Amino acid sequence: MEIPYTVDTRADTGLNNVKLGIWLFLASEVMLFGGLFSSYVLLRVGAEPGTWPQGAEILSVPLATFNTVVLISSSMTMVMAWASLKLRDLFKYRLYMGATVALALIFLIVKVFEYADKFSHQLYPSESTFLGIYFLITGLHGLHIVGGVVVNSYFLLPGVKMWHTAPERFTNRIEAAGLYWHFVDLVWIFLFPVLYLL
Amino acid sequence: MIGIQYAFTALLFMSLGFTLMIIMRWQLAFPGQPIPYIGGWFGDANAPGGIMLPEFYNQLGAMHGTIMVFLGVVPLAVGGFGNYVVPLQIGAPDMAFPRLNMASYWVYFLGGVVMLVSFFVPGGAANSGWTAYVPLAVIATQGQTWWLFGMACLITSSLLGAINFIVTIVQLRAPGLTWMRLPIFVWAQLVTAFLLLLAFPPLEAAAFLQLMDRLAGTSFFLSSGLVVSGQVLEVSGGGSALLWQHLFWFLGHPEVYVLILPAMGTVAEILANNTRKPLWGYRAMVYSMIFLGFMSFIVWAHHMWLTGMGTSISTFFQTTTMIISIPSVVILSALAVSLYGGSIRFTTPMLFALAFLPMFGIGGLTGLPLGLAASDIHLHDTLYVVGHFHYVVAPGTIFALFAGIYHWYPKVTGRKMNDLLGKIHFWGSLIFMNGIFWPMLIQGLAGMNRRMYDGGIGYQHVQDVLHWNNLMSFSAWGLALFQVFFIINFFRSIRNGEKTNDNPWKATTLEWQTPTPPPHGNFLSPPEVHRGPYEYSVPGAVTDFTPQGQRSQPGE
């Protein structure tokens, strides 16, 4: 017996295994970042009045805004990559997937400059609880971006072989990778106002 | 196959966790005396001259809890039984993601190795309790850092496993196996998987925060002006110790149900099979389990009555805590009523399953005074608490796990475990389990604190109950002795046990309708389900059991 519904959808649930799996994974990710954001709220509410800085005093809002645009664009190219596969256009898929990876790398490079700038001003996580939680949440988010880059690069280069043997399965994989990528994007959408603007 | 790997590794870790406790009990019964025979093995850093140091005692305590919960019971109940039995019971060829399953096992294994290695780093293993309360855990020796990394591995493993379980149960049920035809065990595993999926990530977040505190010098959990060994800590301050407790118990309470639900599921399977009649109140049990799962996310602060959260928060959590006891009572009552009018077969698995009912009952009922903020003021942090949760987990869950091992052993090996050895194991375990945990309730009511290195000898008000320490320790060692019967039985039966057919217990659920051991792909032909899970003693049927996969019965 083969494992069923790896590619096809099950009639009564309307899902294939991968899609349900990735949604469950994202649910756990919501709880992970939810735990950290809740900690942020509790720490900030519990801080001595006047000790919690405004994000913009320390962090660079223009850089973060630029990064927000970069990340949202990458989400769009990711959708286009999946849509291109649905239209059976492998060339466009490569184009859009390449753009997604490139945009993610730009995001990371900007982030590295931001971090380096903080360190050069002796602003380490140990400096204040605000900086601690800033480095922790953005760092964890950055690791998620790195993970996305690794997965997407795999699907761009060696993993694309599957397109020729099992196109539908490959398309499903890109859809799942896309869901993850949109989630990482969404975390940033929350993270940007909370840390930089409030 | 991975289920067997999980079960075996988990059993090894359980015996290790048990051994740690055996050593601790020496110190409690005979404080300050050298540990006999093995005292010299621990080195001068832990037990100079064989006499246990307080730091070493703390390591043993913290690691006993960690190993038993995260490396023993959960991997055995979920990773072991769940992995092996669930795909069989739902008629699936395998778990939905076999490679993810493998990954989850190896990450768990890595977490276990990290925990073991931590015993040999300077300062020894984690020694701040299995709850790793801050600020103590932040300033503890480096074993705590290892503990956090180990926990991160175990959490990741549980998450991967949980995703796999849910997808498997939702997607891979055989044709005809509707939700209300699922065996209770599968329902229990499904709810458990959701708890693991949603409750563990906040602990991972908490572990990251504590790692930052320990390694990057942040002070998420350190308040300003904290004095350690007469020195004010040089940290930025402004953190909150309470935050850790909230994050920890947000996992910690659902974790309790992760420990108990698979046990209830196992017991339900075995009860139905050995009373030869359908479970009473199947639907009520299913709905209770789901309700239990939801409620378990909003009761966590009942572990924190004495932290000064404020009375309105206490009132809220006290109310939810009382509400969550209702579904447990429903399930336990349904199981008890299921016995009524049955012609019970007193097999070894049935004995363990039967003992689960009163033992878990004691565990549950002793929890009520702890769930009420007023009575908890007296009982908090006493041995009463230790007695309470051990009744739930040790003679409760672990008995159910033993029952499961005896019950499903013939499925895995094609041979039964020896019944006489099994019964000796059962009676010895039952008596000595109570010998350990009942006196804890008495000592706790007398106000004896837990986690005391000298067993309470230095406290005037507990002198009257101190003598129980001896009985408890000898019971612990007696319990160890009776596990020898289990170990011998377990290994001997692989080769020498009584050979059985594919369905030795005359059971109805699908796992008994495949060859033993199940081949690759589990079933020879895709199974179909035509009836509910517990059709025992159907009037007019030829046999007293009608398997789920059977199309129709003569006379039907």
Image: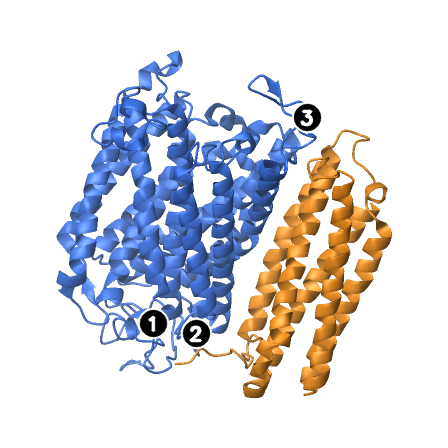
Chain colours: A orange, B blue
Q: Amino acid at mark 1?
A: Leu
Task: Give the distance between the C-alpha atoms of the residues marked 2 and 3, in whole angstroms.
Answer: 59 Å
Q: Where A132 falls versus B517 (above or below)? A: above
Going by the numbered disc 3, the residue's amino acid type is Ser
Residue mark closest to the camera, 2 vs 3: 3
SS at mark 2 in the image:
loop
Q: Residue furthest top?
A: B460
In this picture, is B127 found above or below A168?
Answer: above
Q: Type of residue at label 2?
A: Leu
Judge the density around disc 1: few (<14), some (14-19), many (≥20) Cα neighbours within 10 Å.
many
Residue beneath the point at 62% across and 80% down: A171
Looking at the image, can residue A8 be seen? Answer: yes
The answer to whether residue B189 is left or right of residue B337 is: right
Would residue A97 appear left or right of B66 to someone viewing this image?
right
Secondary structure under tag 3 reads loop
The answer to whether residue A14 is seen in the rendering is: no
Q: Are marks 1 and 2 in contact (CB under 8 Å)?
A: yes
Circle 3 is placed at which residue position?
Answer: B224
Q: Which numbered disc flags the more N-terminal residue, 2 or 3? A: 2
Q: Residue B507 vs residue A138: left or right?
A: left
Q: Quadrant of residue A183?
A: bottom right
- When the figure is inspected, residue B15 is found, relative to residue B126, above or below; the finding is below
Q: Residue at x 24, y 68 (%)?
A: B506
The lab-note entry on whether marks 1 and 2 share a chain reads: yes
Q: Which residue is mark 1?
A: B510
Residue at the spot of label 2: B177
**Residue B170 x %, y %:** 50, 69
Earlier in the chain: of badge 1 and badge 3, it is: 3
